[in-house]
Amino acid sequence: MSSVLDQRPAPPAACPRPAAPRRRTRVLTLPEARWALASLVLFLLALPVHLAGGPSWLWGVLFAATYITGGWEPGWEGLKALKDKTLDVDLLMVVAALGAAAVGQVLDGALLIVIFATSGALEAVATARTADSVRGLLDLAPTTATRLLPGGAEESVPADTLVVGDTVLVRPGERIGADGQVIDGASDVDQATVTGEPLPVAKQAGDEVFAGTVNTTGALRVRVERNPSDSVIARIVRMVEEASGTKAPTQLFIEKIEQRYAIGMVIATLAVFAIPLAFGDELASALLRAMTFMIVASPCAVVLSTMPPLLSAIANAGRHGVLAKSAVVMERLGQVDAVALDKTGTLTEGTPRLTDVRPVPACGLDEDALMALAAAAEHSSEHPLARAVVAAARERGLTLAEATDFTSEPGASVTAVVSGRTVQVGSPARLATTGDAATGNLVQTLEEQGRTAVLVLRDGAPVGALGISDRLRPDAKATVAALTALTGRAPVLLTGDNERAARRLAAEVGITDVRAGLLPQDKVTAVQGWEAEGRRVLVVGDGVNDAPALAAAHTGFAMGRAGSDLALETADAVVVRDELATVPAVVDLSRRARRLVVQNLVIAAIFITVLVAWDLIGTLPLPLGVAGHEGSTVIVGLNGLRLLRERAWTSPATRGTR
């Protein structure tokens, strides 16, 4: 189609790909970190003055400022929780610090406040870093867009003011301002930031484009199909932010017992204070022992044991294009012991190509007519096989008749009225036919060649068969091997494809258990059967026909493929960049996070047990109690943050050597 867009001068031959900015939260932008730093600085100013015997008014003021800057926020939150009849451990720590100051241990109380504030800052850093890498995608979206007005005039507007139905002009080298559909022009679009595709993708009228991707070669007119707040990038960001706000079952269990533990600790503290006092101990000594007990018995390290590892794992996975929708999902991923994989779009690249067109000799159609008939019926379908048929028809320049009354039966067939005749296109096993042996031979020949056979019926009679093949993902074999090593059993292949094609592909990647010719409900039945046996099943699919199985599984993992709505909404986790190797990598990351949680709980339990026993049996110096308790809190916090490191992410090729 000719337009004024075609008259624009060609861009330079080499259009450099802009580097994706990486927005990283600066630690000092977090209020918890600023208050912790202020508390530390004040403490370091007061310490030499106090140790050198300086003026008491000076070090007293500095220590008081240390208490205020490091303790006001947790103290205030604790008082608000107390108003709701909830005893917050943070409040107990502030009370313990004030109690230490009351008996003359001002330095020790200040040290407690400083380390306590530092541990809180560590948790805030872990939470903030969780969303950083993926939220940085928002920086890729342009701030302005060129909107076309009626009559052809142009105006530059803020991209976030675009609405559905607007038409925008995207020139070569510009970023696309909103998710939409190309209505005029042709170009190559670099959409690696969203889909991970290494090469620019050809776009023409009717194709979908995404906000933040780069138009490289030609000008495009794009009709906005989603509001900026609902773009693929914006939805991804919301998912990560929601994930960072959730709590894993282990954390919820800890918080459930925390209240009872805190009440018991208060009662025990009163007993530690009152009993020695009743037996003649001095008031200051009894109070000091009680304050020390309250500090060392506090479960701060236990409370901090769970979320930093899981949040760090979510952040690291997000940095590599895997979105876990919640801390619950990240914890559950490490529990899986069985994996079921879809074929098309999962083990394969999901971009199948039409390789064979076989008309039934007696039907009176040639190859082009058969292809045009099938493509017209498939035009409204989102299935990868349907897109292959439509793409092949476009490549041949065929004119497609308008189809009406389109219906789709997932995993089976599509039906439409084309030029007044009912056309069905779908799986030979699912379409009832009255064809002779010739039709069966066509289908059998295609399947024996490793093709996926698609039967075409017109008014109930078979008129031909199409052969479609899909390329295996380059990382499929390594992924299957890695999943086998992680779970102790090879994955199972669940597919609606024919038995021969499925087994041929399964043999290439090392899968022996193949369930072929399945409808979506059959996949659900298989998954539920394994779940009933006590297995925790991970289902990996393309998020379209596999949606019911994704929902039924212990954990559902969707290959994002350009951010389809169903993939983003149904699955527990989404591979945004469509890299299959990230599936075992994130399972391994989850298992490492779970191991760190266990390590943290053991560390916290040992410190609490030893320090409490020391305080009750002997005489535990308050400074040592503070250092031991808060030191354990910092240790578990830093231990959890280890998963933020780049080397915590491993590929299937290197995992076996770890």
Image (spheres, rainbow, N blue to C red):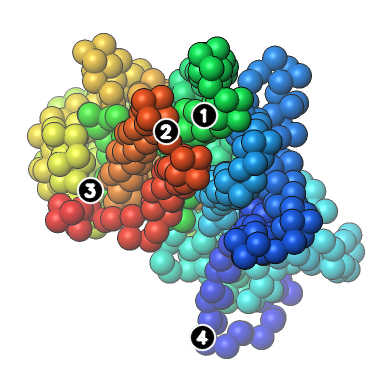
For numbered disc 4, what is the local secondary structure? loop
Q: Residues within 10 Å of mark 3 (few under 14, many from 20)?
A: many
For the residue carrying disc 4, how many other residues have a C-alpha within 10 Å: few (<14), some (14-19), or many (20+)? few
- Label 1: few (<14), some or many (≥20) within 10 Å? many
CA separation in Å, label 2 and label 1? 8 Å
- Sequence order check, earlier mark of 2 and 1: 1
Q: Which residue is mark 3?
A: 479
Camera-side mark, 2 or 4: 2
Dot 1 amino acid type:
Arg
Label 1 or label 4, whichever lies nearer to me, is 1
For disc 4, the marked residue is 14
Label located before the other in sequence (1 or 4): 4
- The residue carrying pointer 2 sits among few (fewer than 14), some (14 to 19) or many (20 or more) residues within 10 Å by Cα, namely few
Q: How far apart are labels 2 and 3 at the CA level?
A: 57 Å
Q: Are marks 3 and 4 in contact (CB under 8 Å)?
A: no
Of the two numbered discs 2 and 3 in the rendering, the one whose residue sits closer to the viewer: 2
> Residue visible at 33% across and 55% down?
648
